[in-house]
């Protein structure tokens, strides 16, 4: 974490009916000066979609050897590597070699579409990789929910996602660009 990072606190209530997961999480997020609210909130969304008591945030955008989020087993082996944005293809390949399962959440509208067009052929060969895209309206709606202290509710049902803070709500529909051909088991 950068020493000049901005600290955000979030109480996240996850109700994931698809996974039968219901839990509250008290989270501390460090936002690097170069990170936007949009990216930070996509990281928070990824946490909600994969919520687990051992899931943790990486050290941030300045730590290239770590993902946005990861889940390690008791031996230190990486079960789940989660990245957000538009990483270089070699970074994704390296993640797939280190982790049992890799999830990539892209966002950013046309830029994300162009990134996928450029990298799809190479990434399609990675059996343990899933790629999902959050349309620009969704990532902007998430960014609008960002506050230094947040009380968030995330509901997942039949692939639909709702994030809410009090009166403000965002309905999010992720487009699956690639599903892993190797099933993920915890």
Image (spheres, grey):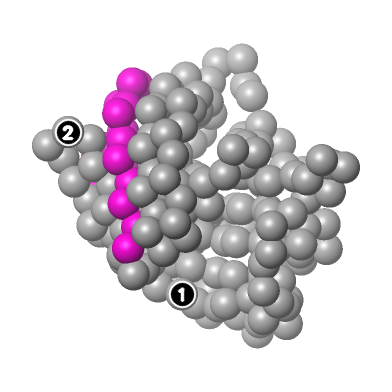
* Foreground pick, 80 / 178: 80
Q: Please name the residue that numbered disc 1 is placed on.
A: 176
Residue at the disc numbered 2: 166
Tag 2's secondary structure? loop
Residue 95, percent across and down?
Answer: 75, 58
**Residue 142 seen in this snapshot:** no
Question: Looking at the figure, which quarter contains the C terminus?
Answer: bottom right
Q: Which residues are magenta?
A: 141-157
Residue 98 sits above or below residue 45 on the image: below
Q: Nearer the viewer, mark 2 or mark 1?
A: 2
Q: Is 185 left, or right, of 18 in this rendering?
A: right
Question: Counting other residues with Cα less than 10 Å from the Cα at mark 2, is it few (<14), some (14-19), or many (20 or more)?
Answer: few
Residue 169 in view in this figure = yes
Occupied quadrant, residue 100? bottom right
Q: Residue at x 67, y 81 (%)?
A: 181
* Residue 94: % across, % down: 80, 60
């Amino acid at each position: 974490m950068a020493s000049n990072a901005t600290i955000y606190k979030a109480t996240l209530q996850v109700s994931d009916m698809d996974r039968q997961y219901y839990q509250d999480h008290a989270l501390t997020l460090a936002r690097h000066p170069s990170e936007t609210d949009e990216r930070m909130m996509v990281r928070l969304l990824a946490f909600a979609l994969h919520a687990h008591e051992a899931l943790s945030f990486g050290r941030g955008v300045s730590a290239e050897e770590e993902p946005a989020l990861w889940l390690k087993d008791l031996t230190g082996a990486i079960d789940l590597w989660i990245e957000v944005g538009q990483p270089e293809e070699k970074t994704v390949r390296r993640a797939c070699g280190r982790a049992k399962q890799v999830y990539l959440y892209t966002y950013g509208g046309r830029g994300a579409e162009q990134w996928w067009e450029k990298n799809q052929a190479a990434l399609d060969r990675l059996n343990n990789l899933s790629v999902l895209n959050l349309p620009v309206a969704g990532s902007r709606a998430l960014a609008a929910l960002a506050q230094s202290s947040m009380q968030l509710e995330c509901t997942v049902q039949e692939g639909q996602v709702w994030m809410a803070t009090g009166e403000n709500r965002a309905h999010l529909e992720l487009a699956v660009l690639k599903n892993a051909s190797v099933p993920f088991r915890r």
